[in-house]
Image: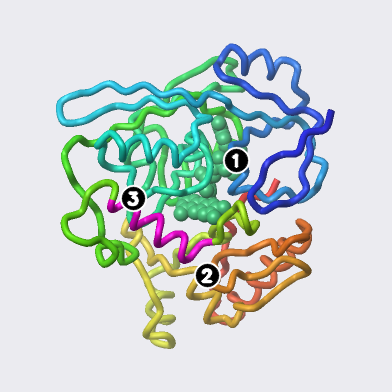
Amino acid sequence: MSVRIPNTLGLDAFTDNWFEYADEEQLAACLAKAPKPWLPVGAGSNLLFSKPAVEGSVFHCTDTSWEASRGNGYVRVRAGAGMCWDDFVKLCVDNGWYGAENLSLIPGDVGAAAVQNIGAYGAEAGDLISSVEVYDTVRGHSRVFFPDECEYAYRSSVFKKSGKRYFVLKVVFKLSLQPSFSLEYGNLAARIEGEPTLQKVRDAVIATRQSKLPDPQVTGSAGSFFMNPVVSKKDFAALQKRYPDMPHYPTATGRGVKLSAGWLIDRAGCKGMTAGDAAVYEKHALILVNRGKASAGDVIRLASDIIERVEAAFGVRLCPEVETV
Ligand SMILES: Cc1cc2nc3c(=O)[nH]c(=O)nc-3n(C[C@H](O)[C@H](O)[C@H](O)COP(=O)(O)OP(=O)(O)OC[C@H]3O[C@@H](n4cnc5c(N)ncnc54)[C@H](O)[C@@H]3O)c2cc1C
């Protein structure tokens, strides 16, 4: 029987081979009978299905369990890959565990958060992760990855680069019991009255996101469609001469300069661009939306028109953050 694959862009995507697993044993049993290629999915909030009929088999983790253990000044939370990411953040905020609050309301599941190294308002999932338990589909057994093996970088990880070799089963997070906030990004401080608390920060993040980003329940999108590009310091110096107001940020490695993809798209005149029912979101140039009946072809055409325009204007080539399947 054909199953519709969930995806926040709202594109038609179906599979004849949909498998759900809650643990290693169930996953191994599913893999034994599943035609290749294998695609693990969460909520489909970073995926662009290029064809309605998806080849091979699609897997979804249904483990939404969690357990917590306290240490000296911290708590470790071991969460199932199928837990909704924002439920995890709410759990932390409700219990007075610090670190995840800036990542409130990011769509998707815990497993994908560890694959994508999701980030917002100066925080990244990778900074909170103390281990990732995966099933290695090449070796046919589970294994644990510790932070120095996860290769976390901007929206990247060893899991993301592995070509779907590792299926995440559980993620272990280390959260602080000591109050500490990071409010310098996205004007969060201005949205908080009085002393910050975990709940106030979560509310501020949610309010800011809701004012800027489309609600996936209402308008199809996959969040930021493109990654912020990194250019060499020499290329940046040349660009800055022409555009002194160009926003720019240091990179984690100190190599190169990170630019704002949203600013480049906006300044290249892409706001208002459409292709069929796909459009650049009017409140945020980095987001492509499905106005109702967009096909994958519409979204792909719009994305490549934007890439061309930005490259023609600035000589910088944008790379999609959204993964095309
Ligand atoms: C409105 C909106 C706002 C967004 N805002 C942000 C933001 O602020 N910051 C940010 O970083 N992202 C953001 N995103 C992108 C998205 O929320 C993240 O990439 C999220 O982690 C995707 O989760 P998912 O469960 O939907 O994963 P999917 O889209 O289903 O999958 C994403 C990737 O993870 C892999 N994967 C999924 N589950 C597993 C598993 N169990 N084991 C192994 N691999 C797996 C998939 O194969 C795929 O490669 C936004 C998206 C939307 C729609």
Taking the image as drawn, is residue 210 in sight? yes
- Which residue in the structure is indicated by mark 1? 43
Image height of 224 relative to 197, above or below:
below
Three-letter code, disc 3: Arg
Q: Secondary structure at mark 2?
A: loop
Measure the alpha-carbon separation of dots 2 and 3: 21 Å
Question: What x and y, as percent, mark residue 213?
Answer: 51, 62
- Which residue in the structure is indicated by mark 2? 284
Q: Secondary structure at mark 3?
A: helix
Tag in front: 2 or 3:
3
- Which residue in the structure is indicated by mark 3? 202
* Pointer 1 local density, CA inside 10 Å: few below 14, some 14–19, many at least 20: some
Taking the image as drawn, is residue 321 in sight? no
The number of numbered discs placed on residues in the rendered structure image is 3
* Quarter of the figure with residue 289: bottom right
Q: Which residues are magenta?
A: 200-213
- SS majority, magenta: helix
Q: Residue at x 55, y 28 (%)?
A: 166
User: Is label 1 within 8 A of ligand 1 (CB to nearest ligand atom)?
Assistant: yes
The N terminus lies in which quarter of the figure? Answer: top right
Residue 204 in magenta?
A: yes
Three-letter code, disc 2: His
Q: Secondary structure at mark 1?
A: loop
Nearest to N terminus: mark 1 or mark 2: 1
Do labels 1 and 3 touch, CB within 8 Å? no
Q: Residue at x 43, y 88 (%)?
A: 242
Q: Residue at x 68, y 51 (%)?
A: 48
- Nearer the observer, 71 or 309: 71
Measure the alpha-carbon separation of dots 1 and 2: 22 Å
- Nearer the observer, 235 or 22: 22
Nearest to N terminus: mark 2 or mark 3: 3
